[in-house]
Amino acid sequence: MKNYEGANIRNVALVGHSHSGKTSLASAMLFTSGATQRLGRVDEGNTVTDYDEEEISRAMSLSAATAVIDWGKSKINLVDTPGFNMFIHEAEMALAAVDSALVVVDAVSGVEVVTERIWHYADRFALPRAIVCTRMDRERADFARAMESLTSAFGRTIVPVQLPIGAEKNFTGVIDLVKMQAYTYEMGGNGKAKIGPIPANMEGEAKAAHERLVELVAEGDDALMEEFFESGTIGEEHIVSGLHNAIREDKIFPVLFTSGLGNMGTDEVLDFIVDYLPTAVERGTVKAAPTANNGEPAVRKVSDSEPVSIYVFKTISDPFAGRISFFKVFSGVLKNDATLQNFTRNASEKLAHLSAMQGKTVVPVNELHAGDIGAVAKLKDTLTGDTLGDKNAPIQYPQVTFAEPAITFAIEPKTRADEDKLSNGIHKLMEEDAMLRFFRDPQTKEFLIAGTGQQHIEVVVSKLKNRYHTEVNLKAPKVPYR
């Protein structure tokens, strides 16, 4: 894999309600860019980002997964996150490592419960967002109803930057409201558009939507407002820069339209990410965690010239590869075989065999620049939330905090052999699952396991059986967690 500097890197999380089409959109983006040779499907269990056997059997994302796309001269680090409420903490963890989010909304269902919840998480991280309405080719998919749902939930700064051409089974493409061109697709094709003029029956609607977009872009910039008043519009190059700045400053939340399964509109989404969403270095600086004496937290510039520092935002405990740590390089250039200090645990770690993870596939890299996302296996002491860096330039980034688990179950190993293996297996799962708890009742001596809900616990029990060959019986729940 090529080395990219931060100005050519985009770190984007796909977030939204469960079954809104996030993983299908990720698959379409990977296929359109040439990163994969076939269009993966959730129902066939062959997508890049839903690779765990539990995810495949349930046809839903259960944990955050990364994928890498080369698009033009840029590298896009995608983080596909779960949307089911019991696994939403995985999405929350991922937001700490990205610089923007694509909020995926089903064009039929509109804004759903988890959509609003994850929107508030993004507010807390001050993340720029764009909205992608997926499944525009489905029955009852409707542009006007989808926009009404979005503006009702999130306000007047929600603005379409595209118009869909056709609806339901007649959806054929989109109109780009900046370039004022039509992009049409072949259903189930390679995702590359045929560019042409706006259909005659949509010229009036497109012109009105273009003017609305121009007005909103001009509102946030005095120079653009002056240009708008003088000439009644803004030049395309100024719209591009103005829209980029407005998105970065959370003044505008643009809306795009696609079909992930049909692979329509995907190249326009990729272009939009590169042209309009913030680069990895536009974040500017990152604040350290508050100090014990309540002094002003240290600040580190997102730059190659700064001392190296990384933040671990996810851990996988793989039965074969061991512990795999996913991290964001906040500053400096991280090279293969570097030795860093873990400031959270006061331990030294050697980072051998740096990689970018394409789902479960390891792609070796030689170095990672400030703003990039990578992974490394077999760190001895490092866990999710830890900060590592140059021992001569200590800094510690804030950890993501979660609510306590909601429910506790008693579990009973089926055999003595299962009891011997239980503690090891459950502690490995706890390394990768921030909401999992395991302890023993001091009175009854029962083994207790706590999580976000029954389905969460059932997934854990299934992983114990399939990964660590440990079988347990799930007994009556004890509510609430204590």
Image: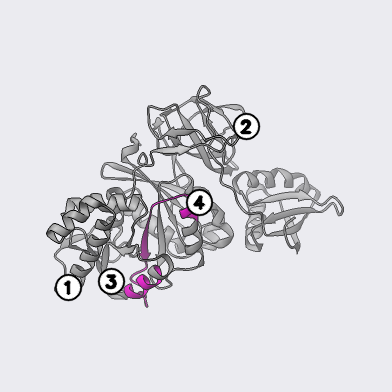
How far is mark 3 from mark 1, CA to CA? 19 Å
Specify few, some or many for label 4: CA neighbours under 10 Å numbering under 14, 14-19, or 20 or more.
many
Residue 228 located within the stretch drawn in magenta = no
Q: Which residue is drawn at 31% across and 64% down?
A: 159
Of all residues, the one furthest to the right in this rendering is 443
Of all residues, the one furthest to the bottom in this rendering is 140
Of the 4 image quadrants, the one containing the C terminus is bottom right
How far is mark 3 from mark 4, CA to CA? 30 Å
Q: Which of 76 and 179 lies nearest the eye of the viewer? A: 179
Specify few, some or many for label 2: CA neighbours under 10 Å numbering under 14, 14-19, or 20 or more.
few
Label 2 or label 3, whichever lies nearer to me, is 2
Label 3 or label 1, whichever lies nearer to me, is 1
Residue 310, above or below 148? above
**Amino acid tagged 2:** Arg
Q: Which mark is residue 171?
A: 3
The residue that disc 4 covers is 64
Specify few, some or many for label 1: CA neighbours under 10 Å numbering under 14, 14-19, or 20 or more.
few
Q: Which mark is residue 345?
A: 2
Q: Mark 4: which secondary structure?
A: loop
* Residue 5 as seen in the image, left or right of residue 359: left
The part of the chain drawn in magenta is 121-150
Q: Residue 204 carries which label?
A: 1
